[in-house]
Image (cartoon, rainbow, N blue to C red):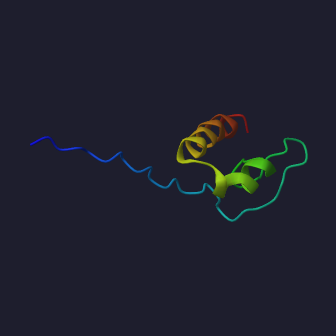
Amino acid sequence: MNSVTAPAQETEVASPCINVCRMDAASGYCEGCRRTLEEIACWSAYSAAEKRAVLTRLAARKTKL
């Protein structure tokens, strides 16, 4: 018997928000999570892949503090 495997469901990616919600005027990033306003506003609509891409960018932003 040939079994068909259902496609793996995307796992939810947790928000990087740490409840320090202040925008830095110079960088345009949130002082807590380092996301832009657009990334924050669109987070819930992003796919898991898009969220992971944002998280990758955040890691680079945090090293430039």
Q: Residue at position x 44%, y 53% from top?
A: 11
* Residue 52, x across and y down, in percent: 55, 42
Q: Residue at position x 31%, y 48% from top?
A: 6
Q: Residue furthest left?
A: 1
* Residue 2, x across and y down, in percent: 14, 40
Q: Nearer the viewer, residue 12 or 7?
A: 7
Q: Residue furthest right?
A: 25
Quadrant where the image shows the C terminus: top right
Q: Residue at position x 85%, y 45% from top?
A: 28
The answer to whether residue 21 is left or right of residue 6 is right
The answer to whether residue 24 is left or right of residue 57 is right
Disc tally is 0
Quick check: 13 above or below 57?
below
The answer to whether residue 10 is left or right of residue 63 is left
* Residue 1, x across and y down, in percent: 9, 43
Q: Nearer the viewer, residue 37 or 29?
A: 37
Quick check: 64 above or below 6?
above
Q: Residue furthest bottom?
A: 19
